[in-house]
Image (cartoon, rainbow, N blue to C red):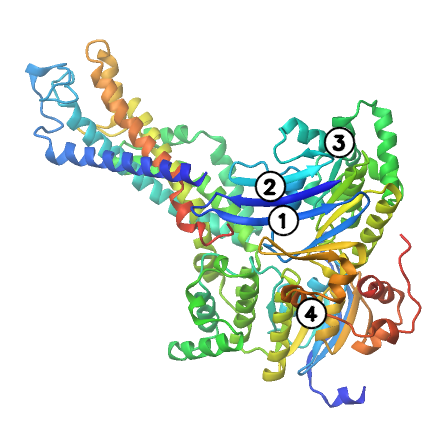
């Protein structure tokens, strides 16, 4: 892993602990690193704490201990219905992000145009309400909003699991393209091992709030060390 | 056993009538597993619901023919439908938590079909229910029998649903996206369970899913639907290895793949025995 | 389903417009004033001269009913708007922030809920004098708790939705999230509550007037007319029938409007199905 040392660290999570009631999975000393321009996968089953970890990194939850190197990561959500405000137009969503990041009015139009091109959305969608869009379009709007605030790190919490397979493929292609063009780092949370293989460079496997295994895609997929990883892989990939 | 002919479902709840399912034809023989795949809005779930007799709605018009054991389910009265539902046709839904009543113990809900269709004493029903719970590979059926849905995990709940659907030994089990809400490892277990049920009781299964890899694992033949139309149908292997229609090709291409996974991975497989 | 709803909406709209027309006609077009007495036509039944007839002092019932209805509607509108505004703001803050603030607010509304709202208004009016402004304050206080509860519930729901979390990540302030982002989503509920509260206010005001705690003489209100006419019911039944019908129609219009879901329509396209 010598090459990694030359890379700049984008996000470093160290010994993160979180415990909260009985309904939310807790985290036990979770450490994780994302390098600049890397797409890191975080896989695990429901209740493993992957969403809790995402919320801690973005600052939506306060961890009980440990450290996180940055806290301005933007997030892409799973449920495209609830992640957009049903009573606001697409245009308002974009405008609002720019307004909140204090971009002067004159520049907003141009920025939004640029984002529409990047996310491959058509301009007349700006006047539409979320319910008038397809799932894929809604997810593109979500990604566009995140990009408008010009983040260096994006956290995507199961961004494609609620979408149809053909749409999934388009969104994944878009995420890859954005990484290549914008030097974006991405923490991709998913339970779908096939998707993770095709998108990510590095992967962490999580179970019950603990990282059980991590490594490059090839290491983990073709030479797993832990039994749990093996079970997961067999279940997902065996025909 | 089951023949669907020219099935057409239209909705009238908006100003313009909408055709949700157009001219669906297929036959399902005893002991066969047929998969219906399609994306959201393709009409696959509506087709399944129509077969189960769940489309008697004022705002929808269902036409065509659904012949099950010589009876046309579409124009039969409610009483005839009831004699089929639960006893000859079992149904498993996508979301096991919302399809179980949260305030009633699981055992009672598993017995439901027996209570409606058979004359049995409480004790007989309980024995049957315990047997059914055991059949779906649940450990400790006695404990499951006496617990509430929220005390079980997602996988356990779906097994309970299958036990309930299978308790009166129906000839046809309709499973509408039964694994979508579950984790991958549990998905694999449920698929194994469905295979087991199919072999043991010769139950025909109509498996509705958007996940082509699961359909490939489970089904003998497959029906690909899009926008209410059947795009392509045939034996599973043929469709997957040699799809004829553009849409089917696109669908298969968009499944993410891990090339040469089998040959490149040398480690010993651990498959959950359950 | 939808067709049924839309016809309800239309009928409600027609009734409301007709009632508004009646009120305006009674006040501006009627040749009589609501206090003009005409001894000759005491207890006169409905005729072309007095379409609703006359009461025990020979006053034109149509004019009085129209003027009374205007006062009832005015008081109710003012009370509903004031009560809804206060209730919405308190409910929004309590639902969004939660915690001790929410706890305190909820216990207070629980206490207010446990007392019948008419009784509460009655208490307030009898302690102060029955000026119109006091009646408005009393009625709006009585409807605040139900708005607090409804709006709080909606906010608790929306607070957990991802779009609110996203806005927090984009550094939107709490008040911007409450009033710009969440509030419009609450409008459909709020709209229906407004109609129901309006009807309750009309009824409560009529009730207060009926027992003599409503508006003062010489002003009339529908409740007061009913209570007065009660004394000579057998002599002049039209004095109780016509104001009664006016009252019922005033209640029916908004009732049908809210059932028919004007807000449901306006917002339907924006929400899931």
Location of mark 3 (residue):
B112
Residue B140 found in image quarter: top right
| Mark 4 or 1: the one toward you | 1
User: Along the polypeptide, which appears first: circle 2 or circle 3?
Assistant: 2
Residue A96's disc number = none
Labels 2 & 1 near each other (Cβ < 8 A): yes
Residue highlighted by disc 1 = B24
Q: Residue at x 12, y 26 (%)?
A: C35
Name the residue: 17% across, 23% down: C61
Horizontal side of A55 relative to C140 (left or right) equals right
> Residue under mark 2: which chain is it in?
B
Q: Is residue B94 visible?
A: yes
Q: Chain of mark 4?
A: B
Asked if disc 3 and disc 4 are in contact, CB closer than 8 Å, the reply is no
Q: How many marks?
A: 4
**Which secondary structure, mark 3?**
helix
Query: Which residue is identified by label 4?
Result: B253
Residue C91 to residue B217: above or below = above
Disc 2 + disc 3, Cβ < 8 Å: no
N-terminal of the pair, mark 4 or mark 2, is 2
Mark 2–mark 1 Cα distance, whole angstroms, equals 9 Å
Of the pair B249 and C152, the residue shown nearer to us:
B249
- Residue closest to the eye, B70 or B35: B70
For the residue pair A178 and C204, the one nearer the viewer reads as A178
Residue B78 appears in which quarter of the rendering? top right
Q: Could you confirm whether marks 2 and 1 are on the same chain?
A: yes
Which is nearer the N-term, disc 2 or disc 1? Answer: 1
């Amino acid at each position: 892993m010598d090459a990694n040392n030359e890379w700049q660290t984008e996000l470093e999570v160290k010994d993160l602990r979180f415990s909260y009631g009985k309904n939310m999975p807790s985290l036990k000393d979770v450490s994780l690193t994302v390098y600049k321009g890397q797409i890191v996968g975080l896989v695990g089953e429901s209740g493993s704490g992957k969403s809790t970890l995402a919320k801690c990194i973005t600052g939506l939850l306060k961890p009980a201990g440990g450290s996180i190197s940055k806290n301005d990561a933007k997030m892409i959500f799973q449920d495209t219905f609830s992640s957009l405000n049903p009573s606001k137009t697409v245009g308002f969503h974009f405008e609002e992000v720019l307004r909140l990041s204090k971009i002067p009015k004159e520049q907003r139009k141009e920025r939004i145009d640029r984002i529409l091109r990047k996310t491959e959305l058509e301009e007349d969608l700006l006047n539409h309400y979320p319910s008038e869009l397809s799932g894929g379009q809604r997810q593109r709007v979500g990604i566009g909003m995140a990009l408008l605030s010009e983040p260096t790190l994006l956290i995507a919490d199961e961004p494609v699991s609620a979408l149809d397979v053909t749409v999934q493929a388009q969104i994944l292609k878009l995420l890859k393209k954005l990484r290549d063009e914008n030097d974006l780092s991405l923490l991709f949370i998913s339970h779908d091992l096939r998707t993770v293989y095709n998108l990510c460079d590095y992967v962490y496997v999580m179970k019950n709030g603990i990282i059980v295994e991590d490594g490059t895609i090839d290491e983990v997929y073709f030479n797993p060390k832990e039994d749990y990883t093996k079970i997961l892989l067999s279940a997902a990939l065996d025909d | 056993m089951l023949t669907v002919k020219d099935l057409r479902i239209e909705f009238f709840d908006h100003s313009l009538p909408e055709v949700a399912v157009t001219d669906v034809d297929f036959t399902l023989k005893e002991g066969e597993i047929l998969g219906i795949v399609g994306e959201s809005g393709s009409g696959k779930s509506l087709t399944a619901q129509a077969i189960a007799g769940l489309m008697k709605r004022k705002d929808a018009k269902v036409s065509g023919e659904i012949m099950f054991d010589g009876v046309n389910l579409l124009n039969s009265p409610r009483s005839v439908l009831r004699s089929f539902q639960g006893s000859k046709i079992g149904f498993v839904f996508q979301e096991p938590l919302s399809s179980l009543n949260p305030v009633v113990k699981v055992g009672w809900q598993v017995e439901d079909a027996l209570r409606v269709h058979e004359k049995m004493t409480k004790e007989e029903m309980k024995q049957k229910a315990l047997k059914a719970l055991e059949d779906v590979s649940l450990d400790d059926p006695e404990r499951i029998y006496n617990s509430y849905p929220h005390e079980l995990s997602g996988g356990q709940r779906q097994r309970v649903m299958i036990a309930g659907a299978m308790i009166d030994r129906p000839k046809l089990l309709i499973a509408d996206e039964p694994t979508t809400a579950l984790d991958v490892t549990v998905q694999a277990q449920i698929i194994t369970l469905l295979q087991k049920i199919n072999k043991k009781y010769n139950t025909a299964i109509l498996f509705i899913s958007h996940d082509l890899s699961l359909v490939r694992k489970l089904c003998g033949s497959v029906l690909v639907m899009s926008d209410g139309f059947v795009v392509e149908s045939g034996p599973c292997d043929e469709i997957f290895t040699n799809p004829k229609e553009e849409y089917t090709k696109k669908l298969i291409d968009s499944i993410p793949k891990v090339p040469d996974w089998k040959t490149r991975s040398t480690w010993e497989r651990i498959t959950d025995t359950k | 389903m939808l067709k049924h709803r839309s016809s309800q909406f239309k009928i409600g709209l027609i009734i409301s417009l007709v009632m508004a027309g009646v009120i305006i006609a009674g006040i501006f077009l009627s040749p009589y004033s609501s206090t003009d007495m005409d001894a000759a036509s005491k207890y006169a039944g409905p005729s072309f001269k007095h379409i609703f007839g006359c009461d025990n002092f020979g006053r034109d019932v149509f004019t009085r009913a129209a003027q009374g209805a205007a006062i009832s509607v005015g008081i109710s509108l003012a009370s509903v708007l004031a009560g809804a505004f206060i209730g919405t703001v308190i409910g929004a803050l309590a639902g969004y922030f939660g915690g001790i603030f929410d706890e305190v607010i909820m216990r207070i509304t629980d206490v207010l809920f446990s007392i019948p709202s008419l009784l509460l208004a009655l208490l307030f009016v009898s302690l102060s004098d029955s000026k119109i402004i006091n009646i408005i304050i009393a009625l709006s206080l009585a409807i605040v708790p139900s708005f607090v509860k409804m709006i709080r519930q909606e906010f608790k729901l929306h607070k957990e939705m991802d779009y609110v979390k996203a806005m927090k990540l984009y550094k939107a302030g709490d008040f911007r999230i409450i009033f710009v982002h969440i509030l419009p989503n609450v409008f459909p509920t709020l709209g229906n509550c407004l109609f129901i509260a309006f009807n309750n206010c009309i009824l409560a005001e009529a009730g207060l007037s009926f027992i003599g705690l409503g508006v003062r003489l010489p002003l009339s209100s529908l409740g007061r007319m009913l209570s007065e006419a009660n004394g000579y019911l057998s002599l002049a039944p039209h004095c109780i029938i016509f104001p009664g019908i006016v009252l019922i129609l005033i209640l029916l219009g908004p009732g049908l409007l809210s059932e028919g879901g004007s807000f449901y329509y306006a917002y339907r396209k924006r929400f899931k199905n």
